[in-house]
Amino acid sequence: MAISRKKPLVGLDIGSHSIKLVEIVPSKRGRMLQNFGVIHTPPGAVLEGSIKDRAGVASAIKKLYKNLRVRNSNVAVSLSGYSVIAKKITIEKMEESKIEAAIHEEAEKYIPYDINEVNLDFTILQSTEEYGEGDDKGESKGRHQMDVMLVAAKRDVIEEYVELVQAADLNPAVMDADIFALQNAVEISLTGPEKCYAIINLGAAELEINVVSRGVSTFSRDSSYGGAQVTESIRSELRVDLREAEQMKLGGMPLDTHQEDGVAKVLGREVSAWVKEIKRAVEFVTSTRSADPIQKIIVSGGSFKIPGLQKYLETETGIPVAPLNPFRNLVINYRRFDADYLDDMALQAGVAVGLALRSIDDK
């Protein structure tokens, strides 16, 4: 992928648990990591992708900017959860002047909201030829079709994010979707070509699944699963505070027998539900695309730090699982960045890295 000559953006991943900032700039040696930092999101300030405490989140973003001494005020942010829908659809090939109206009409079949309440965008992926039944002479009738990636986002949620970024004294230059930002990060981190792979992002409050074939998203699904559920369950089960519960979840503190049993009980219940959800999605894709099977699962998100989860997922699906390291192919000055810290944060940085790969003149 060529390095953009356009003006770069700061990637700002605003999650329910933390806000991640990544700045990437072009250099003679390639894409260079200029800034990376994380700050906790105020509790309850972001729920299911919606901003509930604009002042609190804006204050956190300002503090992160100040701590990292970031000068670029042009940012890319992304939406996730119920507020954004991405769907690959197929329509009959037609003149360019008619495409937008046709897609607008087709979109109403897939969007569970009033069409007037969403912003629509689309990208034409490819043209295919589909053959129907033979005619009276036994000859096939062909008709050309187009694959289109349709993206719809709720207008009121878009406005929430625009107002949030402006409240932090920044310019919202690009609005993306989590799954596409993460796909960008995966593409630049791959060490070799992958025909078909699944990206699984498991954050604090959401499980996102995106299947990519030959660089094109072919299937996506969101579910309300996340690490925050596990932390809360451990807190309730063992009557500890949230900080201790988080450490217990990630294996970051010694446990007595009672605590070990309690954590194992919670993880067994919650992790099993996550893996079942992922397995169902993988099996559905396999049943509909048997000629193009998923060859690898790439995992992202802080919840995949839970000990044993990646191996358990690999065993249950029978598909190799690899953790995402979005920093892998970036130029990094290790006098400025601690290598161990970047390795520790790699699973959580994917969306922010993908956003930072965007530029100010992008669509």
Image: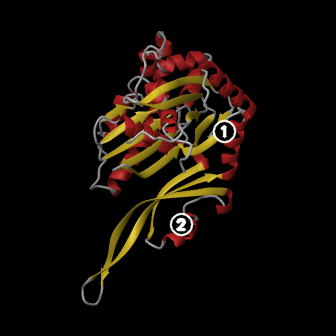
Residue 18 relative to residue 267: left or right: right
Which quadrant of the rendered structure holds the N terminus?
A: top left
- Residue 349's spot in the image, x, y percent? 49, 29
Residue 160 relative to residue 111: left or right: right
Residue lying at 58% horizontally and 33% vertically, measured from the top left:
12
Residue that mark 1 sits on: 171
Residue lying at 53% horizontally and 30% vertically, measured from the top left:
23
- Residue 334's spot in the image, x, y percent? 42, 16
Question: With respect to residue 270, does 339 lie above or below?
Answer: above
**Looking at the picture, which amino acid does disc 2 mark?**
Ile
Counting residues from the start of the chain, the first of labels 1 and 2 encountered is 2
**Looking at the picture, which amino acid does disc 1 mark?**
Asn
Question: With respect to residue 77, does 214 lie above or below?
Answer: below
Mark 2 burial class by Cα count in 10 Å: few <14, some 14-19, many 20+ = some
Residue that mark 2 sits on: 103
SS of the residue at dot 1?
strand
Residue 291 relative to residue 121: left or right: left
